[in-house]
Image: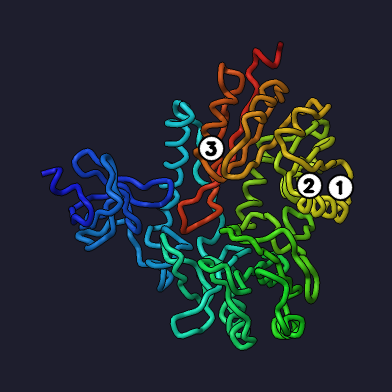
Amino acid sequence: MTNIMWRQDEIIELEITDLSDTGDGVGRFEQRVVFVADTVLGDRLLVKLFNVKPKYAYGQVQELLQASPQRVRPSCIVADKCGGCQWQHINYDYQLIAKHNQVTQALERIGGFVNPPIDPVLVTAASFDYRNKVTYPIGRSATGHVQAGYYHKGTHKLINLNQCPVQDQRLNPLLAEVKLDIEQQGWSIYDETRHKGLIRHLGLRIGRRTGEMLLTLVVKDWNLPGIETQAQQWLQRYPELVGVSLNRNSDRTNAIFGSETRCLAGTPHIQEKFAGLDFQIGPDTFFQVYTETAEALLAVIQSELNLQGHEILIDAYCGVGTLTLPLAKQARHITGLELQSTAVQQATVNAQKNGINNVTFQVGAVEKILQNLEIIPDVVLLDPPRKGCEANVIKTLRNLKPSRIVYVSCKVATLARDLKLLCEAGLYKLTKVQPADFFPQTAHVEAAAFLVLSDNDQNS
């Protein structure tokens, strides 16, 4: 019977018993795993199998036989199609449980930790209306109208949006109206299959505290007739809009932003307040998309470190100084390391704006700079990209032996991998893990892990 049922396009009955770290529901059919999008623990349903492998397959919901108690009606009418959110159909309280489980499973299975010390997921007020930055692909409908939105789940078919419940609601008018202006101007739309056309993405950014907005068009090349006039019209139409920019991305790539940005009207950045400090943020600056939760996680880090003013810190992967600058006010000195030179330029400006003089920034790959620094740090902060730390970073830290390490991660699988290496042979002890919900309505979870050097090594 198994051989008959386990094949492409077969319809089977399945109960969802878990959620994967990508957001899919997980069920088992005769000792084989089936991943099903848009489901939740406790759903019983009929699914059609596809991408069938010997030990696992993916399934598409055909009929919901019995809904889970954790299932809710999505707030967005295209939630079942749009790839922007995976979990709008899941009760928010259970989203937090699932994210806590995700962190626990990664640390236990990948990291090898037994009963890791994981706190409840850190949340702030809103599970909607939180994103301070969005970038929408631009396309055309079958009737030729300009569209902006996210791709249909698992495809590059555009789902047109005039509003989005997870972005800051003050951005909705720009999302709805700017694409009409693009259509009226007659500018060509980028076609990724032919690598032709001009306009690729619409980028919007807002200062949650200041209300200042930026509008950026990502284009294949600079030649957009009439763009300067249109940029001035946008500034006049939207009082909170402080700048309009073009970013050029001429490569055949899935990357959104290219390396060069030109400000056409207004200013090339917004002003934002974060942790009591003033920050300048550009169109393509990395800055956490949920301002309030980022501040709450920073407060946890400050509380755990309890800096006394004499400590030397290294902030690896420091970006524009989001962690560097607030912590500098409590430390003797901080050195920030960052690969992107534009981020370091902004970090330097932000330090100057706030009168913070006990920071130094260095441009380059962390794995190269760290091993050549003539600094013996008390604390090292790590906030790497999703791929985690390079092997040389872990090796150098094990040689440097800072008293404490704080590792902020946006992918718990690589966090668990790196923590295992840092704690190998008992060198460091994991004292606390603080998950944080930076992306409500999605399967993504952020986490900060706190390590202390073992007593034996502190005394050696």
Q: Which mark is residue 356?
A: 1
For residue 406, what is the image quadrant?
top right
Q: Within 10 Å of the Cα at label 1, are there few (<14), some (14-19), or many (20+) other Cα atoms?
A: some
Q: Is residue 331 above or below residue 278?
A: above
Mark 2 element type: helix
In the picture, measured across the screen, residue 375 lies left or right of residue 73, that is right
Amino acid type of the residue that numbered disc 1 sits on in the rendered structure: Ile
Q: Nearer the viewer, residue 48 or 42?
A: 48
Residue contact at pointers 1 and 2, CB within 8 angstroms: yes
**Inter-mark Cα distance, 3 to 2:** 26 Å
Label 1, label 2: how many angstroms apart (C-alpha)?
7 Å
Q: Which mark is residue 341?
A: none
In the rendered image of this protein, does residue 171 appear above or below residue 41? below
Classify 319 as above or below 103: below
> What residue appears at the point 57 percent right and 29 percent down from the top-left corner?
431
Residue shown at 71% from the left, 11% from the top: 460
Q: In the image, residue 22 lies at what x, y percent?
A: 43, 49
Residue at the spot 70% in from the left edge and 20% down from the top edge:
399
Outermost residue, front side? 194
Quadrant for the N terminus, please: top left
Q: Which residue is mark 3?
A: 414
| Mark 1 vs 2, N-terminal side | 2
Residue depicted at x 56% and y 73%: 138
Residue 325: which disc? 2
Does dot 1 land on a helix, a strand or a loop? loop
Which element carries disc 3, helix, strand or loop? helix
Between marks 3 and 2 in the image, the one whose residue lies nearer the viewer: 3
Q: What distance separates the C-alpha of mark 1 from that of mark 3?
A: 33 Å
N-terminal of the pair, mark 1 or mark 3, is 1
* Amino acid on which the number 3 mark rests in the picture: Thr
Q: Earlier in the sequence, mark 3 or mark 2?
A: 2
